[in-house]
Image (cartoon, coloured by chain):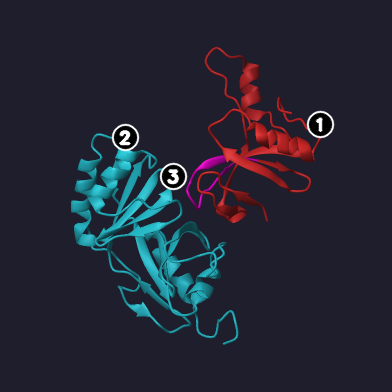
Chain colours: A red, B cyan
Amino acid sequence: MLILNCPYCGVDADETELAPGGEAHIKRFGPGSSDDDFEEYLFMRENPKGVHFERWRHANGCGKWFHAARCTVTLEVFGTYPAQTFEPPAELSAAISAKRPGWTWRTFS
Amino acid sequence: MSKALRPSDGAVWTDGIAAVHQHVAHGMITVRADLNTAPIKAAITSATGVAIPAKLSIETGADAALCWMSPDELLVLCDADQAGAVTKQLQEALAQHHALVANMSDARVIFSVSGAQARDVVSKLVPVDLSPDTFKPGMLRRTRLAQVAAGLWMPDDDTICVLCFRSVSEYAHTILKQAAQAGSSVFRR
């Protein structure tokens, strides 16, 4: 059972209280962008063995969207952070580096 | 307000290890606003007479109670016949702010589960630790009651109030009664 701490209400919510929102930090390119950009936005997803970033919604709680960093191999949760950001907070990246040296995910490392 | 249908019509069900009671109509008003802004907090408190609740808690006053629903949402509980007047007061108090006030009295229902085993009964249905050390009167938790969304709080040590949408009230009433059926104590008594 996955248990994530909601960064908005502080509750340790179990998976049944949450709704999954797929991969985090997906960028939609604006007017004038290329077909390749749109294809990337629509279809191209990471499928990592290890560190992964996801969106979750505290659907049966405060209703807010947030981001979570976890390991797809061990299901270890590295941390959660609010959705109003383009990248994980520095201290979370450092915490992941301490546990998984040399990790990379898209443009993050 | 149209005549509200209630599965038990206000009757208290007492055939099990805890009493299950669907409350007769409450006034319930949703307030959405930035709850970290001092003027907004003051406006809500002046209109309801109740202090703004801390995160994950319920604040009860003489005529109303404020439930913390999310960082930008409160639910005001009051008497059903006062709901219109309180909504108007809140709308006037928050007129100068970016806020929304809506009378949602018909949207939700409240059950109470009471008795010495009330915690055990509700624990069968929610993924929340309801032990006396972690869930105390004054706290409020929105969670999942079996398959539907619900809010929980305790008016006193032996009573748990369950807030859920009216559209699922018959389901909620049924599962609460099932969880409280006779002979279903969690611990040997």
In this picture, residue B172 sits left or right of residue A18: left
Residue at (59% x, 81% y) in the render: B187
Q: Nearer the viewer, residue A106 or B154?
A: B154
Tell me, yes or no, whether the highlighted magenta stretch contains residue A67. Answer: yes
In the picture of the structure, the residue carrying the numbered disc 2 is B98
Residue at (53% x, 74% y) in the render: B120
In the picture of the structure, the residue carrying the numbered disc 3 is B71
Residue B72: percent from left, percent from top: 40, 43
Identify the secondary structure beneath mark 1: loop
Residue at (23% x, 37% y) in the render: B95
Could you give the CA–CA distance between mark 2 and mark 3, rounded to whole angstroms? 15 Å
In the picture of the structure, the residue carrying the numbered disc 1 is A102
Local packing at callout 1 (Cα closer than 10 Å; few below 14, some 14-19, many 20+) is few
Label 3 lies in what chain? B
Q: Where does the magenta region start and end? A: A56-68
Kind of residue at disc 2 = His
Residue A66: percent from left, percent from top: 56, 40
Residue at (57% x, 19% y) in the render: A29
In this picture, residue B50 sits left or right of residue B128: left
In this picture, residue B17 sits left or right of residue B28: right
